[in-house]
Image: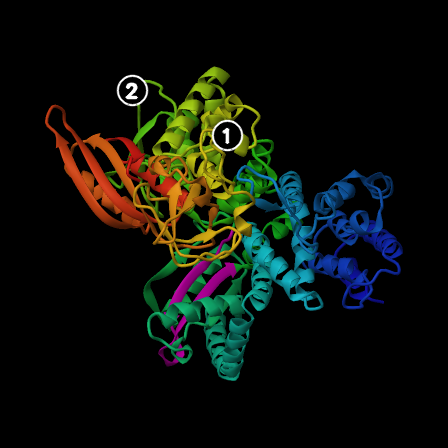
Amino acid sequence: MPAANLLNRVQAYLPEDRYQFVVSALNYAEKCHSGQVRLSGEPYIEHPIATAEYLAEMQMDATTLAASLLHDVIEDCGVDLSVLVQNFGPEVSALVDGVTKLKRLDLSSPDQPTVSKPNGLDGSHISLNSAHSASLRKMFVAMAQDVRVILIKLADRLHNMMTLSPLPPDRQTRIAQETFDIYAPLAHRLGCWEFKWRLEDQAFRYLMPREYRATSRLVARKRVERETYVEQAIRILQENLNASNINAHVLGRPKHLYSIHNKIRRYAHQGMRFNDIHDLIGLRVIVDSQSDCYVALGVIHGLWSPVPGQFDDYISSPKENLYQSLHTTIICLENHPVEVQIRTKQMHRLADEGIAAHWAYKSKDDGSQDDERFDQKMAWLRQLVDWMGLSGDEEYLDNVKTDILGDQLFVYTPAREVKQLPAGSTPIDFAYRVHTDLGHDCVAAIVNGRMVSLNTSLTNADIVEIRKARSPRGPRIEWLNPDLGFAITAHAKQKIRQWFRRQGQGTNIARGREILRTEIDRLDLKLSEQSVATLLGFESVDLAAEAIGTGQLNSNEMARVILRHPAVVNDNSQTHTISGPLSTYPTANDSGGVVIIGTGSGNTHLARCCDPNYGDDIVGYQTRSRGVSVHRSGCHHLRIYSEPERMVDVGWGRSSAMTPTRLQLVATDRVGLLRDITAIVSDEHINIHSITSEEHKEQPRATVSLTVYTTDIQQLSRLFARIEAIPGVISVIRSAGG
């Protein structure tokens, strides 16, 4: 019987009545999945049994085990949730519902084909796999209410990854990527180390098969030598601990393949080969008490020399995922560096199983202090609920990836209070993490005693001081522009948007209209406000302006709309405009990325009178000797052409050709102005063809004219936004010549 191992393991630690509860769930699952097979040909019931086995290894409670056995009966067997409530109670049913995917357009699984439709602000084809994003969002919210939901999902995903080979390669890659991006980081955040490294290794196998095989061969080649070394080190250390009357168990600590691959890659940059890497070996010492950890540390340092600077005490200062251990690196046998981890049995279990271990043993202790500390460490789960209703499914998932699952850093207030933030966070993010009002009124930041800009990326251990405005002033709308890099975290962006929404509809519409008009004028686009509003998917300018004024839309998103949509017809023009989505145009030739519609070829050149940029509305004029001259729609030179029959439909091909664009900016004259401008242009990887500066004698202002080579309007818009953010810059426009 496939379930024999599961039942034997469960019976060993559950009371009889709870054991029978698990048995009843198993029998029901076998009945529901009867006759179903997986792509491998195995009976389907083997999957939920394997899922439950992973959880039984961690001695999870009967409710979790029952839910894991039943986790697919709603989705794959058509069982109604109310039936589960009736047979197994609301707790089991809630867990099963939490891991059940949403059924939307039959695209609730990454195993399903992706269908696209023109939807979204820029008219691009977005994936209807957004239904899958909605399923993940549903799971995260359920997880915040009962963390056992994600433990079941991690076990489910691990078995799916272990049995992924029968699937087609594209599905293998898609599922492996999601595992690497979401489930492995989530296991890490929850402290479930065993799940983390197994998921990473399986994802590594399918995402980088060549590197996976190469790493596997290298490790296998050195296995015997490595095992002999570890056995010798374990014997010597165990004898010395016994001689010191410390009850300890010493074992080797294997490094998983993905970790070894990363280490090999890091060492390769230092000119070292695999044979030169000696810290692939680790030892672990398990003792009875916390005090024994420190006694064992003394024995180890007396036996072998410690490496300076390579000691961490995670017992007195646990990690955010509750991890506790002593880490030290010593020069062991044959002068090889070896990392040793020292921990108690309870710490060891928590290190491997994380939150699962806490769940399993919390009911056995009265340790309310531990529970309080646990609740504090898991406070980030509340964010998963706080974000509900504030963004779409895909944005919600992006927030989770950035704020929850991404790398974290720790910075300090001037009072040395620690604040945890996602990597890449700025002083703005820090201010909002401290207090909402501090974020709203932030005007300056001092990091490690030095004044920095508000979009400076923070690093670990930074000490950050925020300066407030003398009177409440509120945030700036530019903080929501992703091109400027002010607000990175979902938390900060959420608070900023809330502030703008509270300002009143009229205020937001007026602000949005000003931004919209400025964006159109500075790019010198021949588009009306209504045309842009329509392309954005709004019925009126006011609705579009309100979205812009509250920060829901920014200049970068508007540029994408202009880039991807057909040109807008000018009623007063005799020129022809482009029709059809840009993606259908033929591949461009080398002449500036322009193609002649209908032929896809021909001699074209960009007119110097208006310098068309990739994404502009363009028209062509068949010259007598130089082929087709390409102009921006509305170019004043087109008025002199009195032969409409020589006008040619042209379009932008799929090209990254660089085109010249002339910009003019007005700024308060100061030392370092040109340096700041050129630094921004360089940071955007844009070439400067020429730059001139003219001072105004009557006032302390300067006009800077520069010609840059850009690839498209989106890049140009991003450049505009970043230049406008330079202190002292008053305005930036696309000059009349370009």
In the rendered view, does 611 fall on the left or right side of 88?
A: left
Quarter that holds the N terminus: bottom right
**Residue at disc 2, secondary structure:** loop
Q: Which one is in front in this view, the residue at disc 2 or the one at disc 1?
A: 1
Quarter that holds the C terminus: top left
In the rendered view, does 90 fall on the left or right side of 186?
A: right
- In the drawing, what numbered circle is on residue 470? 2
Give the amino acid at mark 1. Answer: Ser
**Quick one: 252 or 245, which is closer to the camera?**
252
**Tag 1: Cα neighbours inside 10 Å, few (<14), some, or many (≥20)?**
some
The colouring scheme, among rainbow, by chain, secondary structure or one colour, is rainbow
**Quick one: 539 or 420, which is closer to the camera?**
539
Q: Position of residue 555 (x, y in %)?
A: 42, 35
Residue 328: in magenta span: yes
Q: Position of residue 284 (x, y in %)?
A: 50, 67
Quarter assignment of residue 339: bottom left
- In the drawing, what numbered circle is on residue 531? 1
Q: Which of the marked residues, 2 or 1, is nearer the chain's N terminus?
A: 2
Q: Which region is colored magenta?
A: 323-343
* Residue 410 in view of the camera: no
Give the amino acid at mark 2. Answer: Arg
**Quick one: 738 or 543, which is closer to the camera?**
738
Q: How many marks?
A: 2
In the rendered view, does 557 fall on the left or right side of 539?
A: left
Residue 361 versus residue 731 in the image, above or below: below
**Residue at disc 1, secondary structure:** helix
Residue 159 versus residue 430 in the image, above or below: below
- Give the alpha-carbon distance from disc 2 to disc 1, as whole Å: 42 Å
Q: Residue at x 39, y 46 (%)?
A: 630
* Residue 93 in view of the camera: yes
Main SS, magenta region, reads strand
